[in-house]
Amino acid sequence: MKPIYFDNHATTQLDPRVLQAMLPYFTEHFGNAASRNHAYGWEAEEAVEKSRRQIASLIGANAKEIVFTSGATESNNLAIKGVAEMYAEKGNHIITAATEHKAVLDTCKHLEKKGCRVTYLPVMGDGRIDLDMLRGAITDQTILISIMYANNEIGVVQPVAEIGKIAKERGVLFHTDAVQAVGKIPVNVIADQVDLLSVTAHKMYGPKGVGALYVRRKSPRVQLTAQMDGGGHERGMRSGTLNVPGIVGLGEACAIAQAEMPEESQRLRGMRDRLRARLEATLDEVFINGSMEHRLPHNLNMSFAYVEGESLLMGIDDIAVSSGSACTSATLEPSYVLKALGLGDDMAHTSIRFGLGRFNTEAEIDYVADKMIAVVTKLRELSPLYEMVKEGIDLSKVQWTAH
C-alpha cells in the first residue's frame, strides 16, 4: 500500500472532476487558442477565456487581469523581474521577506547581480513580518514589495491587507506569492490592495505545469517587461502557445474551490486540530512552529524535541510528510524558514510539516497520530538527552567533553 498522503503543500492529487473537464481538450477540442480563423481555435479560445473568468472570480479580479504561465515559479519571475525592468528609471529597491519561497528569493538574488538592491525582512517568532519594519525599509527608490500570502512550510498567513495599504500609501507596487492561500482561504485582490498575485494549479487539486499571474489594470495600471518573447501572447506579457487542457483544469479547480472552500476549510481545520490535540495530549516537548491564530486551516508544523529527525522520518515511512519545503528537501541543511523563526538546528531538524488535503479522512488522522506517538516515544527511549531532561537536569548548564 502507498503511504498516507499528508504532503498537500508540496502538491495535491488531481481532483477527478478537474480531470473530466480537461479530457476533451486533449482530443476532441485540440485547437490552438491563438488560431482565429476556424472553429477549432475558437473553441480553445472560449475555453481559455472561461478559465480566465473562473480564476478572476475566485480572487476578486477582472478576467482581463489574468495572465497564464507555466506555474508559480514563472509567475513570480515575471512579476518581480518584469517590475524591476519596467520601473528601473523610478528605482531599483525591492523588499521581500527571509521566509519567502526560493522562487522569490532566488529571483531577488539574480536581480541583485543586475544592480538591484533587495531588503530581506526578518520575521517575528510567529513567522509574520513586522509592519513597522516594513514601513522603515521603504525608500524613495523602492519599486516593489513581494511578500507571500501564506508560507509553504509553516502555513503562517501574513497581514496582506495591511501590507497592501502601506504599499498603496507609499506608491509602491505589491506582489504576493499566493500559491498556498488561493483556494484554501478567502483572497481578494481589491480588498487586499494587491497589484500582482501568483497562482498555480497543482496546489489546489489541478494539474501540474500551469499557473497564472494577476496583473492589476487600473489604480494603478501595472506594466511588466515580458520575460518570454515570441508571438506576443497574453497581451504581450507572456508569449507561447497556451496549454489549453491545463488552463481548463486550473479554471475548474478554481470554480470547485470557490464553491466548496468554506465547508472544506472548516473540515480540514477540525481534522488538523484533532491531530494536534492528540499529539499534545500524549507527548511532551512538542512545539508548534509559527502562529496558530494566523495559519492555513490545513497546516500543522511541529517540532519533536529529543528525537533525531532522519530517524523520525524513517520510522513513519508509511506516512508521506515533509520536514521542510519540497524544493529544498534534497539538502540536509535545516529549513531556512524554521531558522528564521529562531529555531536551532536540532529543533529545526525534528520538525514535521503535516499538510492535510481534500481527500484525507478522520481515520487517517487517527492512524497518523497513533504512529507519530509510537515512533516518537520509542526514539525518546533511546535518547540519553531526553532521559536527562526527565531527571530534571538542565542541559544548558551541562559541560560536555569531547572524546
Image (cartoon, rainbow, N blue to C red):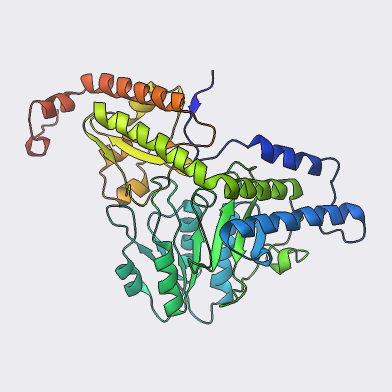
Which image quarter: residue 34? Answer: bottom right
Which image quarter: residue 224? Answer: bottom right
The C terminus lies in which quarter of the figure?
Answer: top left
- Count the labels in the image: 0
**Can you give x and y, in whole percent of width and height, for residue 156 in the image?**
38, 50
Q: Is residue 329 visible?
A: no
> Please, is residue 342 above or below residue 119 in the view?
above
> Please, is residue 269 above or below residue 275 in the view?
below
286 left or right, relative to 225 = left
Q: Is residue 310 visible?
A: yes
Residue displayed at 44% across by 61% down: 147
**Can you give x and y, in whole percent of width and height, for residue 144 in the image?**
48, 71
**Can you give x and y, in whole percent of width and height, for residue 275 in the image?**
36, 32
Residue displayed at 60% across by 76% down: 218
Viewer-nearest residue: 224 or 334: 224
Viewer-nearest residue: 136 or 20: 20
Residue displayed at 91% across by 54% down: 39
343 left or right, relative to 264 = left
Viewer-nearest residue: 53 or 144: 53
Q: Residue furthest right?
A: 38
314 left or right, relative to 202 = left
**Can you give x and y, in whole percent of width and height, for residue 389 in the image?**
12, 29
The N terminus lies in which quarter of the figure?
Answer: top right
